[in-house]
Image (spheres, rainbow, N blue to C red):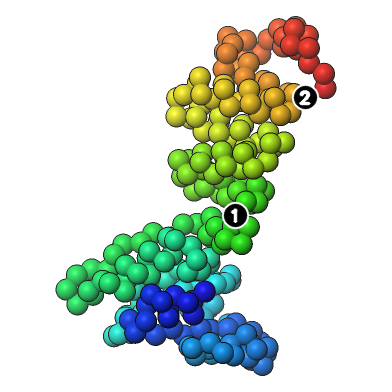
Amino acid sequence: MWQRYLQETARDRITFLSVAVDTNPERARPYAAGYPFTTVVDSTGVLGRIFGFDVIPNGVLIDERGVIRHLHLGGFDIRRPEVAERVTALLEADFATGAPPPFTQEPLDVETFRLELIDRPDDPGLLVALGDALVRAGDNVEAERVFRRAGDLDPSDWSSPFAVGTILEGWGDSAGALDWWRRALARDPANFTIRKQIWRTEHPERFSPEIDFAWQKEQLAREGYRA
């Protein structure tokens, strides 16, 4: 993919150097053959020690004066639109007259799941994992979109619509949250956790200042609950 990018987009604007991390330099040779860029081998993990990474692929963009302008750890794949946009912006930047464009890399777990989704974009399990990572990173806006897509791809998955409801509740949208929790419950009617979350929102007086366990038992009977 980098070969295509170099030929079709970057052309003469960038020099690409590939670094294979392997204790045996000969193992990298078959993978490097035939590509229009140089590949060197880091057999002692020097780059990992310098930049503090223990995953690949990574990208280091250096200007003509040898100044590092961007470091991307994990998930550095030109097939990812956001990576292509960053590389293009850096190629177009005039470092002599202004500051480089600011980029903030996402957490490593988010980067890793995005990279895996390139080859498996319709894998609901990977999408759920990405959604969870986005929530941990504080990006609930994209997490909600990811969970919706995961739920569409796997109609048996209750956790994705439940997660959407939880995000909506955090935004103060109780009606929207209840709608998504009911969708989750329809997928897994025996799931007491979902049912209890619905009750807590519809009947907060049954949970504070004390939990009304007798009411819960009656409510289960009214709803025809079967474990």
The three-letter amino acid code for the residue at tag 1 is: Pro
In which quarter of the view is residue 156 placed? top right
Disc 1, SS: loop
Q: From what the image shows, is residue 130 above or below residue 46? A: above
Residue drawn 31% across the image and 62% down it: 102
Which is nearer the eye, 7 or 144?
A: 7
Please state the horizontal and vertical placement of residue 112, each as a whole percent of the image. Answer: 57, 60
Q: Quadrant of the C terminus?
A: top right
Dot 2 falls on a residue whose secondary structure is loop
Q: What residue do we see at 78% from left, 16% from top?
A: 225
Which of the labelled discs sits on residue 195, or is there none? none
Image spot of residue 53 (x, y percent)? 54, 71
133 up-or-down from 88: above or below: above
Write the residue at 27% across / 72% down: 92
Give the left or right position of residue 19, taking residue 15 as reference.
Answer: right
* Residue 71 visible somewhere in the drawing: yes
Q: Which residue is mark 1?
A: 121
Would you say the residues marked 1 and 2 are in contact, meaning their CB atoms lie under 8 Å apart? no
Indicate left or right for 95 with 194 as reference. Answer: left
Instruction: Determine the residue located farthest toward the left in the rendered image.
Output: 97
Inspect the image, locate mark 2, and give the three-letter code of the amino acid beneath it: Ala
Relative image position of residue 164 (x, y in whole percent): 55, 34
